[in-house]
Image (cartoon, grey):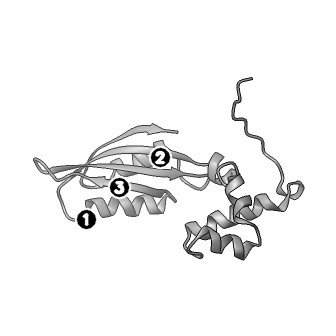
Amino acid sequence: MNKRTRYIVVDTAVLPEIFSKVLEVKKLVADKTERSYSAACKRMGISRSAFYKYRECVFSYHDKMTQQIVNFSITLRDQAGVLSNVLTTLYGMNANILTVTQNIPVDGVALVSLSLKMNGETSNPIEITHAISSLSGVVEVRLLSGE
């Protein structure tokens, strides 16, 4: 029989407590509240073996299903403050910036690649494209992809 990954949404109130604790352990280590999985497991009162059994299978619905990654390619004039204005605009639109890669300017322009994590509070990619395009020093904005 072919084993296929299937996802279901279940209220945590009906699940064994271990699943919520596994999520909390992952969060404690990710935000550096705890230095190791061992310490985080101890803090949450679960065994490391239980954590390792479920860690790749348990994730928050919000983290996994309600967000998308959007990639932009932006050509900017080689002028002070242009990239800063783009980033400030994105902040104002509740965009969570994952990566920014700026190439060395050639012929007075620099290519910037941006990856954003979108969520329910973020403006949509088309609105973001228009807002960035209207900024002084922005030559071109292209929406490359979105998950």
Q: Which of marks 2 and 3 is in front?
A: 3
For residue 21, side relative to residue 37 (left or right): right
Coordinates of residue 136 in the picture (x, y in percent): 27, 55
Q: Mark 1 points at which residue?
A: 81
**Mark 2: few, some, or many residues within 10 Å (few <14, many ≥20)?**
few
Amino acid residing under circle 1: Gly
| Residue at 85% across, 57% down | 16
For residue 51, side relative to residue 129 (left or right): right
Q: Mark 3 points at which residue?
A: 100
Coordinates of residue 120 in the picture (x, y in percent): 62, 52
Separation of residues labelled 2 and 3 (CA atoms): 19 Å
Q: Assign a secondary structure to mark 1.
A: loop
Q: Mark 2 points at which residue?
A: 127
For residue 137, side relative to residue 4 (left or right): left
Is label 2 in contact with label 3 (beta carbons under 8 Å)? no
Separation of residues labelled 1 and 2 (CA atoms): 22 Å
Q: Assign a secondary structure to mark 2.
A: helix
The mark that comes first in sequence, 1 or 2, is 1
